[in-house]
Image: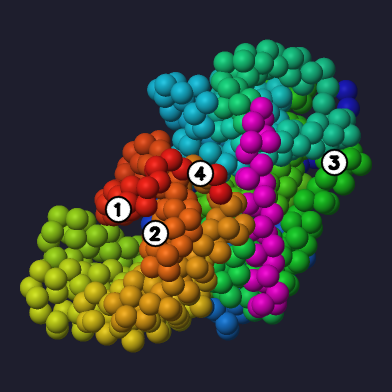
Amino acid sequence: MNPKPARKSAPQTDGLQIAGIILVAAVVFLSPLVAGKLTTLPALSMQVVVFAAATLWMIRAARQRSLALPAMRVVWLAAALFALGVLSLVRTVSLHATLLELAAVASYLLIFLMVAGLNSSPTRVYGILAALLVSGVIVGTIGLKEYLLTSSPEWRVFSTFFNPDFLAGFMGLILPVALAWYLSRTSGVISIVTGLAVLLSFANLLMSGSRLGMVVALGGIAVFGILALGSGSFKRAQAVRLALIILPCILAFLWLGKPLASRVASVKAESYSGRFRIYTWIGTLRMARAHPIFGTGLGTFAIAYPKHAIVGWTKLAHNSYLQYAAEGGFAMPVVLVLLLGVSAVPPAASLLRGRIAHFPNEADADRDVQWVPNRPVLLSGLLGGAAASMARNLVDSDWSVAAIGVSFWVVLGATVALASSGARRTISLSRRGSCAAAVVLSLLIVCVLSAIVSLTYSAEGSAHIAQGELNGAVRAFRRAIFYDWLNADHHRGLAATYVLLGRASGEQWYSRQAERCLLRAAKLEPTSRKTRYQLGMLYTLELSDYERAVQEFQASLACDPHSMRTLLNLAWTYERMDRKAEALAVYRRMVRIEQSPYEGIRAVPELVEPTYVFAHRALGREAERRGDRAGAVREYRIALDRIQRYEKSMEKMGPMLGSVGRRDFEMEDEVKVLKGDIEDRLEVLGADGSASKH
C-alpha cells in the first residue's frame, strides 16, 4: 500500500463560516436557475447573497483577526482587476451602468476568493461544487423537457438561459467537472447523480445546436483527460466507469443530436454567424482603440458600441476579453488573463508532476468509498471546465451572464483551493480593518437592494401603462427614480408616461414634463441614442418644434449612425419642414446602409428590416417626378420584394417576437398600407408587381 499524506486538522467550524458557506452554495445553486437571462433583477438578487456571504466572511475575520486567502499573487491580481474597473468610471458614458457592472465584477471576485480561501476545508469545496452539479441536473432536465415538448426535431433548446449558445456555455463548463466526479469511486447514489449530470449536460449541448459550444466542451474534456492521465489518477476504476457512460452518450447523440447535426450540415448556409462575429470583433476593437486607457466604462458596451459598429447592433461583444478592453481599457484583459493564468497554470503543472494526492478519507483510497471525489481527478475536471469556459469567451460573452459568471469563478476558486488543500494560508487583519470592510459590504448590499426596489417599481410602471393606468404609472416611475436616480431608463419611462397623458388630455404641460425627464436622462447618459431619439420624437409629434427635433435626431445619429428608425423619422421631419432635398439625402443614406455589410450580415437574418421600404418608396416617387419611369419601377419593385420577405419573416418570427413583447404591430400596419400604395403605383406605371433581383 502506498503511504498516504498526512492531513492537517482544520480549525473548528463556527456558525459564521457555516452560514457563509450555505449562502455561497445557495448562489451557486440558484444562479443557473434564475440568472441565465440578460435581465438585471435576478443578477442583482444573486449579488446581494454574495455580498451577504462576504460580510459574514469579514465579520468572522474580525473575530479571528485573520483572513484565509489563496496565494497573494492571486489576491493582488484580483484587486488590480477590480481597480481597473473602478478607474473606468473616469470616462464612463453611463455612471449607472458602470456601477452595476462593478457590483457584478465585485461579486464574481469575492465568491472566487471565498471559495479559493477554503484550501484547508476541501469537503466544503466539494459541497459547493455539488450544489453546482445538482443545479446543472435541474437545468438539463428543463432543457430535455423543452425539447420533448416541441414539434420540431431541429429546435434549439434554451432551458433557463437567454439563448441556446449561453446554455451551451454553461453545460460546457460543468461537463468536465461532472465527468471527473462520476469517474471517482463514490457511493451508488452519488454515481447516479453525477452520471446523470454528465448525460444531461452532454444532451443539452447537443440540443442547444451550438457548434462552438460543443467544440470547446470537447476541448475541455480533452484537457481533463490529458491532466488525469498525466497525473496518474486515471486508473482501471476510471476506465471501467468511462466505458459504462459511453454507450448512454452515444444513445443520447442518436436521439437528441438533430439540432447540432442540422447546424453542422448547414455550416455554409449559416456562415453569416461567423462573419457577424468577426465584424463585431473588429467594431469592438475600434471602440477599444478610441478609448485605450479607461475604456467607455464597464457595462456600457450596448450604449457606446453602435458608434463603432460595422454590422448590426448587438448587446454584447461575443468576446469577453475584447469587451473588457473596450469597456475598461486595454490593461483590463491583460490583468484578467494574468489572473486566470496564475489560478490555473500552477495546479495544472502540479498535476502533471504528480504533486497532487488525494486525502486518506477521499474516494479511491483503500478505505471505505465515500461521497467525496478523488482530488486529482476532480482537479483535472475543474481545469478542463475552466479551460472550456476561457476558450468559449474568445467567441462569446458568457461571463456577462450572471449564471455563467458565478459558475466559472466558483470553478476557478475551487481549482485554487483544491490545488493547495491541506495548507492553510492566512493574513493578519486588524479588527478595525475587518469591521470597516464588513460595513462597506453592508452598504453595498443596501445600494443593490435599492436598485432592486427601483426595478420593481419600474416594472410596475410598465404594467400600469399596459393597463392604461397612467397616473399609477407616474407614481411608480417616480418611486423608481427615488430609489435609483442614476438609472436613465426610469426617467425615459416617466417621460413616455407623460407623453401618453398629454395625448389623452390635450394639455401641453405633460409634454414639457416629458421634455424635462428626457433632458435629465440625457445628462445621465450623454451618448445614449435612445434618449436623443425620444427627444426628437417628442419635439416632432408633441411640441411641433421641428428644428429641435432635427438637432436631436442628428445627435442620436452621432451615437448610432445606422439607426434606421432615427433616419426614417429624420427624413419625415424634413418632409414636414418642406425640406425635400434633405429628406431625399437621408433616404439615399438609408439605401447605402442597405447595400453595406451592416444590413447584409445580420445577427438574426430571419428577421427582415422593413424601414428600407419607405426609402425606396420615396426614391420611386422622386423618380416619377423627374419622369424616370424605369427608375421608379426599379425602386418600387425593390420595395415590394422587401415587403414580401418581411411578411414571410413575420409569419415565422412574429409569434416569438410577440411572446417577448417585441412585435411592432404598428409597423406591420404601415407596411401593409405601403404595399397597397406601391402596387397601385406599379399598376399606374404599367408594370406588374413581381419582384426583381437587385
Q: Check disc 1 and give the amino acid type.
A: Asp
Mark 3 to mark 2 CA distance (whole Å): 68 Å
Which segment is the magenta one? Answer: 264-292
Quarter of the image where one finds residue 197: top right
Q: Which of pointers 1 and 2 lies earlier in the amino acid sequence?
A: 2
Quarter of the image where one finds residue 43: bottom left
- Whether residues under marks 1 and 2 lie with C-beta atoms below 8 angstroms apart, the answer is yes
Check disc 3 and report the residue beneath it: 351
Q: Nearer the viewer, mark 1 or mark 3?
A: 1
Q: Is residue 479 magenta?
A: no
Colour mapping? rainbow
Q: Check disc 3 and give the amino acid type.
A: Leu
Query: How many labels sit on residues?
Result: 4
Identify the residue shown where x is 88% and y is 23%: 1
Q: Is residue 274 magenta?
A: yes
State the image coordinates of residue 574 (x, y, percent, origin top left): 36, 78
Q: Which mark is residue 617?
A: 2
Mark 1 to mark 3 CA distance (whole Å): 72 Å
Q: Which of pointers 3 and 2 lies earlier in the amino acid sequence?
A: 3
Q: Nearer the viewer, mark 4 or mark 3?
A: 4
Main SS type for the magenta part? helix
Q: Check disc 4 and give the amino acid type.
A: Ser
